[in-house]
Amino acid sequence: MADLLFAAATLLLLLAAAGLASLWWAGNDLDRMLAVQLLGAAGIAVLLLLTPAMGDSSLLDTALLLALLAALAACAYRAAFGPTRPKAGRPPAAPRP
């Protein structure tokens, strides 16, 4: 059973490497952020597969930490590059012709 888990983890690592290549050639910031989220999810999946294969429960803690960091990275991206809203009490600016 451990060999099957190691093989699945290896396949996920190869797919994550392909995602890293797409991250290198990504067109815009949104594509890059989605590729980073893909790499984070693949990393979590690899750690979850390796936990029973290696019998090391500390990998579960690492997977949880990686999941939290991936969520915080998405929130930080939204805060830094997301669309801005007009402040309360001010009407939105009219579009220019």
Image: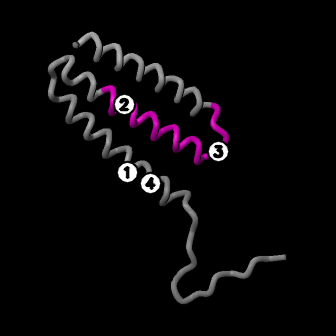
Q: Earlier in the sequence, mark 2 or mark 3?
A: 3
Mark 2 neighbour class, 10 Å CA radius: few under 14, some 14 to 19, many 20 or more: many
Give the residue at mark 3. 28
In this rendering, which labeled residue sits more in front, label 4 or label 3?
3
The span from disc 2 to disc 3 (Cα, nearest Å) is: 23 Å
For mark 3, give the secondary structure. loop
Amino acid at pointer 3: Asn
Question: Looking at the picture, does residue 23 appear above or below residue 52?
Answer: below
Horizontal relation, residue 72 to residue 4: left or right? right
For mark 2, give the secondary structure. helix
Horizontal relation, residue 40 to residue 85: left or right? left
Q: Residue furthest bottom?
A: 89
Give the residue at mark 1. 72
Q: Earlier in the sequence, mark 1 or mark 3?
A: 3
User: What segment carries the magenta color?
Assistant: 25-46
> Which one is nearer the viewer's eye here, 81 or 55?
55
Q: Position of residue 63 (x, y in %)?
A: 27, 35
The quarter of the picture where residue 61 lies is top left
Give the residue at mark 4. 76
Amino acid at pointer 2: Gly
Disc 1 to disc 2: CB gap under 8 Å:
no
Disc 1 to disc 4: CB gap under 8 Å:
yes
Q: Position of residue 49 (x, y in %)?
A: 27, 24
Disc 2 to disc 3: CB gap under 8 Å:
no
Answer whether residue 53 is magenta in the image.
Answer: no
Give the residue at mark 2. 43
The span from disc 1 to disc 2 (Cα, nearest Å) is: 16 Å
Amino acid at pointer 1: Leu
